[in-house]
Image: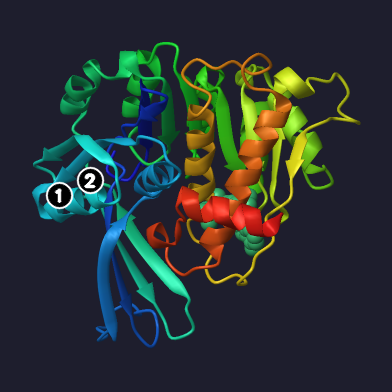
Amino acid sequence: MYYSRFYQCVFRPECLQTSSEIVRPVQQITTSTSMHIVRPGETLSSHGHESRVGGKGANQAVAIARAGGHSRFFGSIGRDGLWIKDRMEGYGIDISGLIVADEPTGRAIIQVDAKGENSISANFSKLHEERFKKQGEGWFPETTHLLLQNEIPLASTLYALHNVKDATVIMNPSPLPSPAQTRDFPWKKLDWLIVNESEAQELYQAAAGSGAKSTDSMTTKELLFRLSSESAFGDTNIVCTLGADGVLAFVPTFHRRQNAEAPSALYQPAAKLLHGVQDTTGAGDCFTGYFVAGLMEFGPHAKLGKDITEEDLAKVLKKCVVAAGMCVEKKGTIDSIPTRAEVEERMTLLR
Ligand SMILES: Nc1ncnc2c1ncn2[C@@H]1O[C@H](COP(=O)(O)OP(=O)(O)OP(=O)(O)O)[C@@H](O)[C@H]1O
């Protein structure tokens, strides 16, 4: 339980914007820089040391807020992490769902050496399940958009998943659950699955089991087609981020085809960068936050093919790749997530 990771964000309608809640995805990240990564038995003095807020849920909640969505973070910190509350409020996140528990805040300790290589040791403070349920009782049924990650205990994720009603559910299942958990997870309950290519491959292998085809010579389109064809995934839409190659979305409403040889999908190349790549950390979280905020703009209960066309979706993806591209142009994670105004200005420049 201590080491499994799950995060969620929940959104409720408020005017046209929505609000989000995230379940204890916060972490205190401590980075220290030294000549080399510490060896067994060695004590090393570091040159620099800094503490900041992190974790996939926190990053994604910030991205939603910067993209203009009302982002409610639902989770827990320990008393040692009270400073995180102010920091998150400063990022424009609604922290009314943040529980202060007796257990210490999750922590990641990162060592960076002179060449920029790093090593990370992380734990995630134990989620107070009863308090989580109590806190979520009133909120989950009203939620319109629920964003899940894989950094809190599975039981809490399942609780949120089973207690939302008519919500659009999005999951970025990173880090991936174990193969056994993957086989049992109720993937069909998700409206949107956001993965990178290696996660899509692993999910396909786990879902297809002994019937899985080799993914070595598969195109990404075929991979997404085959993943989507696995009964475990039902009509779940799959968004697969491809790093510098952009993103591919397989949306059964638009792309259902019976032919694996010629599958169709929506492709959006990565945005042109104006300042080169500085740091790709958190690009996926930035993308995910912007994607969810983009869906929220269609209002609660928006249906694909009716309220959201394929062209609308293409516009959302375009904004997401521009935002994620701007994120890789800067060092850092949360601080490199651009605001909506910055993204719109960049889109004008790239036109
Ligand atoms: N080198 C790059 N150049 C331009 N855009 C990039 C680059 N790397 C990432 N991106 C943008 O960021 C998006 C997400 O990146 P990626 O597919 O690497 O996600 P990820 O594997 O979840 O990353 P991470 O876990 O590091 O956040 C891509 O779809 C793309 O739009």
Look at the numbered disc 2 and give the secondary structure of its residue.
loop
Spot occupied by residue 286 in the image (x, y as percentages of width and height) = 49, 50
Q: With respect to residue 24, does 20 lie above or below?
A: above
Q: With respect to residue 250, does 123 lie above or below?
A: below
Q: Which residue is mark 1?
A: 104
Q: Which residue is mark 2?
A: 125
Q: Identify the image quadrant of residue 143.
A: top left
Is residue 242 rendered to the left or right of residue 27?
Answer: right
Residue shown at 63% from the left, 26% from the top: 237
Q: Is residue 209 visible?
A: no
View extreme (right): residue: 261
How far apart marks 1 and 2 lie (CA) works out to 6 Å
Spot occupied by residue 4 in the image (x, y as percentages of width and height) = 35, 41
Q: Please name the amino acid that badge 2 sits on.
A: Ser
Q: Is residue 350 visible?
A: yes
Q: Quarter holding the C terminus?
A: bottom right
Q: Is mark 1 within 8 Å of ligand 1?
A: no
